[in-house]
Amino acid sequence: MWSTRELAELAGTTVKAVRHYHKAGVLDEPEREPNGYKQYRTSHLLRLLQVTRLRALGVPLKEIRAAAHPQEALRAVHDELDATIERLQRMRAELAVILEHRVPLDTPSAFGAVSGDLGPRDRALLTVFSRVWEDASLADLVVLAAERRDYEAEFEVLPQDADEATIEALALRVAVAIRDDHARFPWLRDPGSESPQGKYTADAVVAQAFVENYHAAQIRVLARASELVQADTE
């Protein structure tokens, strides 16, 4: 039989830890000798070794106390570690993209490879898109973001008071590009339907982002281009 200190030394832990385990209800109190000293037996040592090992494996004391079988507690820790490892791997991959491409922190890592060519408005829009669509759709948007369109320069400098003839001519060119995009990526014909957020929410979020990032004449060009594309399907 052993004293508290001797038990702790045998188990490779501390007297403080032994007392804590008693208080936590994971290690039974031993009987006391007539002189009042605790006298631990082999069963206490075995239990203490089990508890210290479970703690070293990351099992919380409340789980040790509640589990009828240690395997249950270990399985819970194992599953939690799997989730943590997956999260850390995602973080590492995202950090690698940010560092390699010097991605601004206001740009989703999915667009890291093209971030250097994006202006503040494009980054803002793509950030919104990253909350609306998932990886497969975002991969297609990366392809589109990397491409330069022949109408882009004119669209960027389009004056807010542009006349209808100018808007119509530009909308025709935008419509050609949209048709090509739809042919390559059919989901863009109804992008909201591909969103895990639901079509109504996705369409509303994207529409709001466009309204806040383009001026009235640019919105008219986009709306007219959409009408021209829609007319092809009717």
Image: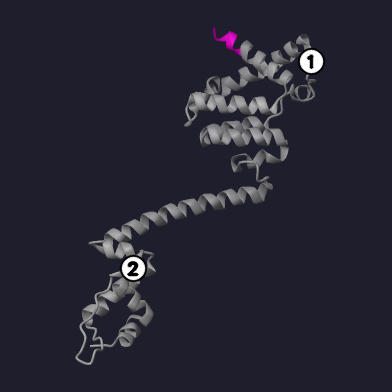
Q: Nearer the viewer, residue 11 or 231?
A: 11
Q: What residue appears at the point 53 percent right and 22 percent down from the top-left corner?
A: 186
Which of the numbered marks, if any, corresponds to residue 162?
1
Extent of the magenta region: 229-234
Secondary structure predominantly adopted by residues drawn in magenta: helix
Rendered image coloring scheme: one colour
Q: What residue appears at the point 33 percent right and 56 percent down from the top-left corner?
A: 76
Q: Nearer the viewer, residue 152 or 27?
A: 27
Quarter holding the N terminus? bottom left
Q: Does residue 76 appear in the picture of this structure? A: yes
Which three-letter amino acid code belongs to the residue tagged 1?
Answer: Ala
Tell me which numbered mark, 1 or 2, is placed earlier along the sequence: 2
- Closer to the camera: disc 1 or disc 2? 1
User: Dot 2 corresponds to which residue?
Assistant: 54
As drawn, 28 above or below 233: below
Q: What residue appears at the point 33 percent right and 78 percent down from the top-left corner?
A: 19
Which of the numbered marks, if any, corresponds to residue 108?
none
What is the CA distance from the residue labelled 1 to the residue labelled 2?
Answer: 72 Å
Which three-letter amino acid code belongs to the residue tagged 2?
Answer: Leu
Q: What residue appears at the point 51 percent right and 52 percent down from the top-left corner?
A: 89
As drawn, 231 above or below 38: above
User: In this image, 225 relative to 134: left or right?
Assistant: right
Residue 163 located within the stretch drawn in magenta: no
Q: Does residue 13 appear in the picture of this structure? A: no
Q: Position of residue 209 (x, y in %)?
A: 63, 29
User: In this image, 205 relative to 7: left or right?
Assistant: right
